[in-house]
Image: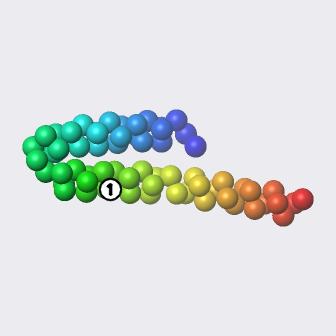
């Protein structure tokens, strides 16, 4: 995992938080909720390959023992 992915996640988090506040103050709570959900899906799509790699490494370690 590179440090670049952490910066991307941080940038998405800051952007989503900022847009969330703007949407909530303008009375569009439904759009704010969908924005949060979209941000979560984007970040999960970046992280899932890394989680998969961790599980594969664990499976290899268990098979060796």
Q: Quadrant of the N terminus?
A: top right
Residue occupying image coordinates x 78% and y 60% = 60
Give the camera-side residue of 64 and 30: 30
Q: Which of these two is toward me, 60 or 34? A: 34
Among the 4 quarters of the image, the one containing residue 44 = bottom left
Q: Residue at x 29, y 39 (%)?
A: 17
Look at 81% across and 56% down and name the residue there.
Answer: 61
Percent x, y of residue 56: 69, 60
Residue identifier under label 1:
37
- The quadrant where residue 65 appears: bottom right
State whether residue 64 is above or below residue 13.
below
- Residue under the point 30% across and 51% down: 36
Q: Residues within 10 Å of mark 1 (few under 14, many from 20)?
A: few
Query: Residue 7 at what x, y percent from top left?
Result: 43, 35
Q: Which residue of the protein is positioned furthest toward the right in this rendering?
A: 65
Q: Secondary structure at mark 1?
A: helix
* Figure label count: 1
Residue 34 horizontal side relative to residue 41, left or right: left
Seen as rendered, the residue at the extreme left is: 26
Check the image and tell me how it is coloured.
Answer: rainbow
Measured from the top left, where is residue 11 in percent x and y? Answer: 36, 37
Residue 50 location, x and y as percent?
57, 53
């Amino acid at each position: 995992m590179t440090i670049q992915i952490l910066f991307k996640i941080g940038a998405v988090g800051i952007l989503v938080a900022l847009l969330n506040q703007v949407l909530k103050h303008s009375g569009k709570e439904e759009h704010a909720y969908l924005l949060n959900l979209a941000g979560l899906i984007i970040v999960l799509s970046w992280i899932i390959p890394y989680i998969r790699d961790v599980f594969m490494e664990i499976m290899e370690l268990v098979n060796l023992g």
